[in-house]
Image (spheres, helix red, strand yellow):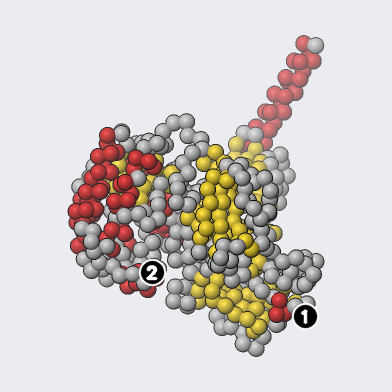
Amino acid sequence: MKKFLLFAIIILSFTLLSIFVAEKTDVLGLQQKTLVAAFKETDGHLVLSWERLPYPCFYRIETYSKTTGLVANEPDLHFFLGEFTFNDSYEVPRSAIPMYYRVTAYGMFGQLTEPSAPIANPNYAATRPESAPVPIFHYTKEKPASLMPFLVWHTVPDAVCYEVELLSAPPAQEGGIQPDKASQLYITRKVYTNGWQADLRPYANRQVIYWRARALDLHLQPIGVFSKSEPIYIDSSLPMPQAPLLNTFDQMPDFQQPIYPVYQWIPLHDIMHYEVELMTAPPAEEHGTQPDKGRVWSRIVDSANTCYDEYARPYAGEYYWRVRALDANNNIIGTWSDTAKFTMPQRDKRVQTAVLGDSITHGGGAISYSPASLEYSYTTYLDFPCLNLGRSGDTSTTTKERFDTDVLPLHPLNLLVLTGSNSLRAPEISPQDIINDLEEIKRKCRSHDIRPIFMTLMPINPGNIKYAFHTDTDPQWRMKLTQVNSWIRQQDYYIDLEPYFYDAAGQQMDTGFAIDGLHPDIRGKMLMGEIINMNKKLFR
């Protein structure tokens, strides 16, 4: 037995030595290998695959986005996450912005190949003048549509709305920005999310029609071009969807709801009233018509696709939610949607960092995107974990007033504070009022061993705010901004956002950062994250 064991040890040692020599001397020439990858997408699931190396190994796939290039000494790419697989394929995380992936092969004793060159997500590969929505659902002869199918596509970054065109035949010219009058059956610009339930009942006698979409900005001007026309094969005998479609198609990697959750969906055709319910366990009946007996919260909203939870959900555990349509008298239409789940993580010790503020912190932008669209949250682009305690609509006073309920139970070591932009706009609120609120937040932080790190308020653009929200701005907003930011720059710990966001004249928020004049869009939120990353020395 001892001889056998000794022999086994010798064989194992020889095998490991051979593997070590093979990997470290690269006798197989693996380090000169280039991993060539390709993508395939099915119903929104994008799979990256590559040729397996002729050697036992595993692979690391890293996910990145490009940085803005506007902050000194920042890297070219922002790292999101890295995962390992023994397979020669990997379903890449869903995203709503251009993403890049690198694949590296590893053996038993370390790295075998150099990381591949960044591989672009094909759904966002086009330059902005040529960008177009990419369809997610395909209605083929084998998988036809009902008379009211959901048409869904990948979001176009910063699109405020979409124009959808139904056609009797493929257009004379694919792409471009002009509708096709010759084959047009129907056209609408009233699509404010990346999906639309089409009503094909007027075309029930047709076996196939075509559709395409293009993105529009706040002024209904094209962002890019029409998508390639897509056939819809119709089977009028199929049942028509009777529930909203949950919109989880373009979520950022490691999606996590902010502490004030927001729920979003793709609406039923021409329905504007919905009820959302929240549960701490899956519903007793899926796709039923009655409220779940175990629900902990519900809300009826006059909104086509979004519901803001008015309560914070800081407690660890799993939450489940769903939505159903109602008519103008709150009568039920159809059934409940599928059920979505999100998890609030367990926190056995103090939170390292949290952010506190108004809608700029809560998230959202480009008019139509809520805080559930994490590409419009600056916390998405931070290099470190961060808990989002933002709440849309806050003034500096209401932010201060919820400190005890929202901040203290989590007791973060560091608290990033950005609030007061809504107060700048209100004539009845003075700069000293805002400063007094910030002073009180600082006092509360210090009395509870929390380090307050204040961020200067960014400029706003009253003209864009007026166009987007039909509200006026206090003409004295610049004076108020100057006084508040002067106070912030006197604090022990602060991050100066203001100088980065002015237009060429240096007078107001650059439209390129915030189309609505107030809430930074994707590029603006990226920039905020990058500025914070460059100030990590301020954090404990």
496 or 115, which lies in front?
Answer: 496
Expressed as whole percent of the image width and height from the top left, the position of residue 238 reads 77, 67
Q: Please rate how many residues cluster around mark 2, counting C-alpha atoms within 10 Å: few if below 14, some from 14 to 19, many from 20.
A: few
Q: Which quadrant of the rendered structure holds the C terminus?
A: top left
- Which residue is depicted at the point 66% across and 83% down? 185
Where is mark 1, residue-wise?
A: 205
Where is mark 2, residue-wise?
A: 469
Q: Amino acid type of disc 2?
A: Phe
- Which residue is depicted at the point 64% across and 84% down? 184
Taking 354 as reference, is 249 above or below it?
below
- Which residue is depicted at the point 60% across and 80% down? 187
- Which residue is depicted at the point 66% across and 55% down? 289
Kind of element beneath mark 2: helix
Expressed as whole percent of the image width and height from the top left, the position of residue 112 reads 62, 42
Image quadrant where residue 428 sits: bottom left
Q: Amino acid type of disc 1?
A: Asn
Q: Is residue 448 left or right of residue 375?
A: left
Q: Is residue 267 visible?
A: no
Image quadrant where residue 427 sits: bottom left
8 or 353, which lies in front?
Answer: 353
Image quadrant where residue 210 sits: bottom right
Q: Is residue 160 visible?
A: yes
Expressed as whole percent of the image width and height from the top left, the position of residue 264 reads 54, 58
Kind of element beneath mark 1: loop
Taking 253 as reference, is 280 above or below it?
above
Mark pair 2, 1: CA separation: 43 Å
Taking 242 as reference, is 361 above or below it?
above
- Tag 1 or tag 2, which sits nearer the N-term? 1
